[in-house]
Structures are given as C-alpha cells and as structure tokens.
Amino acid sequence: MILIKLGGSVITDKKEYKRFRKDVVSRLCREIKDSGKEVIIVHGAGSFGHVIAKQYELQKGRIRNDQTEGIAKVASDTRELNNLIVSELTNAGIPSVAVPTGSCFLMDDGKLLMNDVEILQRYMKIGIAPVMMGDILVDRKKEFGICSGDEIMRCLASVFSPEKIIFVSDVDGLYDRDPKTTKNAKLIMDVNEDVLNKIPDEMTVADVTGGVRSKMRTMLSMCSDGRECILVNGTVDGRLRSLLLGEEVVCTKAKK
C-alpha cells in the first residue's frame, strides 16, 4: 500500500478562496489509477480551509466567541473539497469513500491522537480507497484545533506501514531557498536532519499548518530503512505516475 498526500497548493489555488484545480486533480487521479497501486489518500484544505481558518485564528484554539461561526464555515468548505476529490477519484476508476477525520482522530492540547482506524482498515479490505483531509477537530483542552494533512499522514504511516509515502506539492522538492522568490535556488535531492537544519527560516511558508519546514520534519519522522518518504511536483504531467511505478523522477527524498 502507498500513502499519498495531495497538497492544498496542488489541488487548489491558494490565492483565491475556494478555487478547485479540477484539471490537475483529474490528471493526478488518472495517474494513480494507471499505476495500479493500492492507496490511501489524504489531502490538504488549501483555499477551502486556510483562508477562513486564518481569519478566525482557529489554529490557536478557543480565544474568542465568534470562532464558532468560523468552525462551521471551515467544516462546510473542507467537506465540499473532500467531495470534489472523491468524485475525481471515482471518475478515474478508483472506488473511494470520504472518511471524516473526526471519526478516527481527536486532539489533546494540539496533539493529534488516533481514536479508531478500524473503519479505514475495513474499507481497504473490500477494495475501497479511504480519503481523509486536514480538518477542524475537537480538542480536549483547547476545545478545537486544526489537524493538518501532514499529521494525519504521520499517524497513518505508524498504523499501516506503507511501502512508500508520497507528498504531492507544487514544487519539484525542497530547495535551499524559496524557489518562488529566488532565481538561483537549488533543489535538494536528499534530506536528513542535518540538511534540514541548514535551510533558512524564511523557507517556512506562512500558513496555518506550519509550512515546508514542518512538512519536512514530519517526513523525516516517517522514514525507516525500508521506506521512502518523497516530496514530488504534482503539477508536472506524469511525474506522480512514474514515481508510483518506481521510476526515477525529479523529487526530494527524506532519509533517516
């Protein structure tokens, strides 16, 4: 089984509220189907979640009364996106079911806890790909909090022991500087803890789930001697398919 995270920057346009990249998602779903691999899909919230979550400061937990309205808006928007992803997977020939994140996880003072993953296991047993997403979850101490797709990936990796873990983003991999603002930024093909510590602080993207540094640390925590954890560009046609088939592609591999 392969665990795949479709990043919010790939499946949505983060500059525009609730802008779904249907063509890109449709192609990525076909590439997954063409690979013939068994998968669990996790996706980010992108512009369906980050805009409102940031406006209401939901990542901080309960700090003001009007946040309840924000929780409801984000929950509605992210479920709309989740349904769009499941629809594209189904259209590509991958039987899929949306599994609400809150049915398997909860939080305790910002920490993600697994509650019950039996539903995921049973869907996979009958040949259905579970689809989960970054979401608003109840928190035992903060009342609520934002659960990132990356953290879901980390928890699922510990339970299912996937042969490969893939994070699909909108860049070729990890760079020594921000490639979107720096012309001569260099791609780092292999990353370990020492390499990551040398990456400038400005590489941390300002979003409510932590950005690229947080993503790479999560990836490193998921690595093992027999498991690859890879960051790949999903905006390039065929690259995800090639990676799933074991071919060499431009990407960044996290190594223990």
Image (cartoon, rainbow, N blue to C red):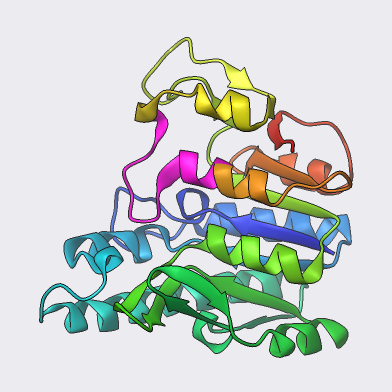
Q: Indicate the quadrant containing the C terminus: top left, top right, bottom left or bottom right.
A: top right
Residue at 49% x, 15% y is: 185
Q: How many marks?
A: 0
Q: Quadrant of residue 249?
A: top right
Query: Residue 127: x and y, percent?
Result: 85, 82
Closer to the camera in the image, 72 or 145: 145
Residue at horizontal 48 percent and vertical 24 percent from the top? 199
Does residue 206 appear to the left or right of 79 in the view shown?
Answer: left
In this rendering, does residue 238 appear at all?
no
Magenta range is: 203-216
Is residue 220 in the magenta section? Answer: no
Q: Residue furthest left?
A: 65
Q: In what quadrant of the picture does the N terminus appear?
A: bottom right
Residue name at image x 54 percent, y 24 percent: 175
Observer able to see residue 67: yes
Image height check: is 61 above or below 36?
Answer: below
Residue at the limit of the structure toward the top, as seen here: 184
Residue 9 is situated, as x and y percent measured from the top left of the image, at: 46, 48
Task: State left or right for residue 5 relative to residue 59.
Answer: right
Q: Position of residue 231 (x, y in %)?
A: 65, 41
| Magenta stretch contains residue 212 | yes
**Residue drawn at the location 27% of the way across and 84% of the way down:** 72
* For residue 121, side relative to residue 166 (left or right): right
* Residue 206 image point, x, y percent: 31, 43
Q: Is residue 64 left or right of residue 205?
A: left
Q: Quadrant of residue 27?
A: bottom right
